[in-house]
Each structure stands twice: as structure tokens, then as C-alpha cells.
Amino acid sequence: MIIAIDGSTASGKGTLAKRIAAAYGLPHLDTGLLYRAVGLAMLESGEDPENQAAAAAVAARLEFRDLDRRELRSAQAGAAASVVAAHPEVRRALIDRQRSFARQPGGAVLDGRDIGTVIAPDADIKFWIDASVEVRANRRRRELLARGEEVSSARMIEDLIARDERDRSRADAPARAAPDAVRLDTSDLDPEQVFQAARLAVETKLFLMHAGTPDPRGAS
Ligand code: DC
């Protein structure tokens, strides 16, 4: 079973993806970390993340095992990630490995922005997770504070709006919900409520798959 979990920055999609993966015993890939790793490597080598050719070369060399560095979660890495993620050559360099991860025997959970539309359009179930910009800014501020990084609320909201705009308006694989995605707004929900809502959707899909009934949403 392939589960695609896309959504906006700090919407809660990462937390949900981890919980769903654990509940169904599936491997999980946070694809945002790939773009963060490319963005951070560019910053560390003194390159401008706008440089597409250099960023694509970094992406081609990227090893998935390099994805657990703590620095990847920083605000700086996130901002650079959004810039390198807009380069078509960077996306191309990362696509095959994400697709192989999705198609491994038994399936997988992937979270990102284009999983349901580009990486695994054939996913068994797709989610689009969102929340108001104020709620997302608060969540991201708390995460950064826990890491010792302090960002004002106004600055965080501004950053998120700029990031959302860049992610949604890029020509290649813009961040958007697949037409057959289940949409969840997490503004007024805690992580447990989000998990329960998503689990219900997965269970319904599994039931329909086993019963051989076509999904009324149109997904295969
Ligand atoms: O989810 P995140 O904040 O870790 O993502 C970092 C950036 O990477 C974000 O600006 C959008 C981009 N991204 C993407 O373009 N495609 C993905 N599948 C995942 C993330």
C-alpha cells in the first residue's frame, strides 16, 4: 500500500506520516529532507541556492542515508530547500529514488508536496494536509524554539507566506492537492485527532480495496 501525504509547511503532515507509517508497519520517507539536504549543502559550500546547475549536481550525489542531520530542520535549511526545490533539474535528479522508495514491495508512506501528483500518482490513498497560516507559524516557531532558534511570530508568518507562494507557483511540480486527495484541515485538531481522521480514511480505502468496490472518490 502506497500512502501519499502532501501538504503545506508545518501543517502536521510529517507527524501524521510518521504515525501512519508506524501504525501500518510501512517504511517512511520525508521527502522535504531531500530538498533541505540539497539546500543546506549549497549554503555550506558557499554556493547560491539559486544556482540550478550546482544544486542539481549536489542532488545527483545525495545519499538517502545523509538525511538525519539535525541541521536539516533549521529555518535556514528550510528556506534554501524551497529555492532549490523550484529548479526542475534538482527535482529530476531526485525523482527516480523517490519512486523506487514508493514502489518497494509492501509499499511505503511518503510525505512532501508532489507525492500524490508526480512521485506516486498511483498511490492507494492520498492526503492533502493544511492549516491556517497563524496556526502553522505557531507550530513552526515552537519547533524552532525547542532547537534554540528564536523567530518572531510576524517574521514566521511572512516566511511561511513567501514559502507557500514559491512552492505553489513554481512551474515544475507545484505544491498542490491531487484531485483524488482526502483533504484535512488541522488548524483545530491535535495530532491524535489528525491521526484518527486519517486512519479512518485509510481503513475505509482498505475495506473498499478488499471488497473490490471502486473508490467513490475515483482513486484506483
Ligand atoms: O516539508 P519541508 O518544510 O521539509 O519542505 C522543505 C521544502 O522542500 C519546501 O519549501 C518545499 C520543498 N519540497 C518539495 O518541493 N517537494 C517535496 N516533495 C517536498 C518538499
Image (cartoon, rainbow, N blue to C red):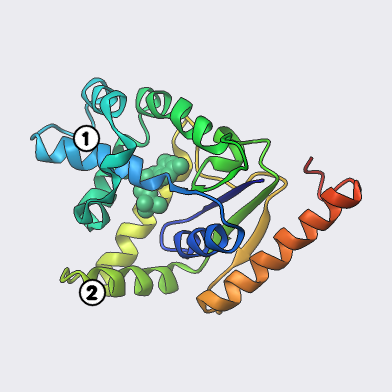
Q: Position of residue 206 (x, y in %)?
A: 77, 55
Q: Secondary structure at mark 2?
A: helix
Q: Residue at x 29, y 66 (%)?
A: 156
Left or right, 68 with respect to 184, comes to: left
The vertical placement of 21 against 113, above or below, is below
Q: Residue furthest left?
A: 46
Residue ID for mark 1: 49
- Residue type marked 2: Ala
Q: Residue at x 37, y 72 (%)?
A: 139
Closer to the camera, 20 or 159? 20
Q: Position of residue 77 (x, y in %)?
A: 23, 49
The tally of labels here is 2
The span from disc 1 to disc 2 (Cα, nearest Å) is 26 Å
Left or right, 32 with respect to 76, comes to: right
Q: Which mark is residue 33?
A: none
- Residue type marked 1: Pro
Q: Residue at x 85, y 50 (%)?
A: 210
Q: Secondary structure at mark 1?
A: loop
Q: Position of residue 212 (x, y in %)?
A: 90, 46
The vertical placement of 200 against 128, above or below, is below
Q: Position of residue 177 (x, y in %)?
A: 61, 48
Question: In terms of image quadrants, where is residue 115?
Answer: top right
Label 2 CA crowd tier, 10 Å (few <14, some 14–19, many 20+): few
Q: Residue at x 83, y 48 (%)?
A: 209
Disc 1: residue Cβ within 8 A of ligand 1's nearest atom: no
Image quarter hosting the C terminus: top right
Closer to the camera, 103 or 159? 103
Residue ID for mark 2: 146
